[in-house]
Image (spheres, coloured by chain):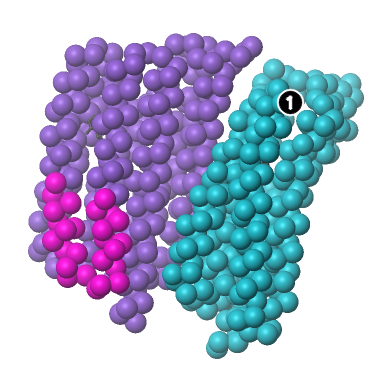
Chain colours: A cyan, B purple
Amino acid sequence: PDISSTTFSVIENAFSLVFASFLGAAVFFLVSRRDVARAYRTSVTVCGVVVVIAAYHYFRIFESFKSAYGVAGGVATPSGEIFNEAYRYMDWIITVPLLVVELILVMGLVSARRRSLLYRLVPAAFAMIALGYPGELSTDVATQWLWWGLAMIPFVYILFVLFGEVSKVIQDQPIEVQPLFRVVRVALVATWMFYPIAYLFPILLGNTGLALALENIGYAVADLTAKAGYGLVIFLIAKRKSELER
Amino acid sequence: PDISSTTFSVIENAFSLVFASFLGAAVFFLVSRRDVARAYRTSVTVCGVVVVIAAYHYFRIFESFKSAYGVAGGVATPSGEIFNEAYRYMDWIITVPLLVVELILVMGLVSARRRSLLYRLVPAAFAMIALGYPGELSTDVATQWLWWGLAMIPFVYILFVLFGEVSKVIQDQPIEVQPLFRVVRVALVATWMFYPIAYLFPILLGNTGLALALENIGYAVADLTAKAGYGLVIFLIAKRKSELER
Ligand SMILES: CC1=C(/C=C/C(C)=C/C=C/C(C)=C/C=O)C(C)(C)CCC1
Ligand SMILES: CC1=C(/C=C/C(C)=C/C=C/C(C)=C/C=O)C(C)(C)CCC1
């Protein structure tokens, strides 16, 4: 749709803000990984890898958005080029399993338990993203609702298992990191909830500038917290645990 | 051929996904190499180098694919520019020998044995790629089959020797890494098989959008597993061995 040039600028600037944050987060995690004990280092490395991948995708999304509109006289008009939002799905299919891995590694579980969690959660994460994707490609509202509903099944399963697992593990963690694990537990559910909601904006509000802005700013906030913010908490847990074990 | 804009998007997104994965894998391997003992560090470094090279080639393939089509009104029409698939061969000619090197280094063989394997496998890898290349350039089906058949000879030889060597070496490895070597052995055969099959799609299905999609997604999956997935297993072997020796 035609959107106001203000809406266009706000979205464009939000994309740029997220890119810059991920760039900074990437440098932070990759440089700081050596400050934590060997046992938690891979977890922090994965935090870094996730934001590198996310930075790349935001760069692409930013460029794709800019080329999809021509701005003139206070109005941004579609240029004919596609605004390729599917980059988000390409991002999630890589980063969601990695976010699960980060958390599992920093919990310091015994390897059999770790393996069992990975074998359940990673396929569920793939299924969730793969089931959301056809709805993203479609322009038919019924189809979009259908795939949304199907993707919600693995979504609920993942959150349920992760929340339960963190809750179980909290008791075994050193008292000093228990509050951080409580933060992770809430952050997981709170930030992941953004995604299925942001997905619904264009369905509920139709093809308008407002829906476009809400959807993309919703995803931007969610991506920042679910990747950089969450990574920071993982790093803090790793650091605290390293100090305790030293 | 004209292809639908959905097919175009799916292929474009697959290229981007692979690029992003290699970028993430490169950061991971290059940063994590210091987490393994000196004896296995070169092996992990080579894993990083392979995915850097592969990321570069996927960037080129992505750009070449985009410039080869113009998308309008739900159809992607050839723009007249060539979709340069030969980048793949340029990639393989560098990375296939390096993949062989990674594996040989992490096995920790005595140096005479290592040398003998390299002298047999590296030339065979060159021959395999070089023999496949004329078939890729040709548009004549008989010519394509001919070079495919010739390239299959070194292909079978390489897999035969590598599979045999890994099988022989497994007994001498610490019990803790034997399952990982078994994964490598299967992964090698399973992922490498994709290549001669993906090559055949355009020959068997003709010059269609479906053949283009299957060929490129086939290669994408194969590249991801043969480079990043395989590198990850090499890294895990190196890490486990380092811990055992510490
Ligand atoms: C349930 C659901 C979805 C959930 C997506 C989620 C939960 C994505 C999480 C992404 C994260 C955590 C990225 C952070 O890096 C989709 C695919 C939008 C489709 C509609 C239904
Ligand atoms: C047998 C055969 C081929 C084999 C290619 C292979 C086996 C490539 C492997 C590439 C890898 C492992 C890359 C990963 O980084 C070609 C050249 C397609 C030509 C047709 C016959």
Classed neighbour count for the residue bearing mark 1: other residues with Cα under 10 Å, few (<14), some (14–19), many (≥20): few
Q: Is residue B172 left or right of residue B197?
A: left
- Name the quadrant containing residue B153: top left
Q: Is residue B163 above or below residue A143?
A: below
State the residue at coordinates (50%, 59%): A118
Which secondary structure type mostly characterizes the magenta part of the structure? helix
A134 vs B7, nearest the viewer: A134
Residue type at mark 1 is Val
Segment colored magenta:
B160-186
Can you say which quadrant of the picture contains the N terminus of chain A? top right
Q: Is residue A142 visible?
A: yes
Can you say which quadrant of the picture contains the C terminus of chain A? bottom right
Q: What residue sits right under mark 1 in the picture? A: A141
State the residue at coordinates (76%, 57%): A190
Q: Quadrant of ligand 2?
A: top left
Chain ID for label 1?
A
Percent coordinates x, y for residue A22 in the rendering: 66, 53
Find out whether residue B170 is within the magenta segment: yes
Percent coordinates x, y for residue B208 in the rendering: 41, 14
State the residue at coordinates (59%, 37%): A131
Q: Is residue A49 visible?
A: no
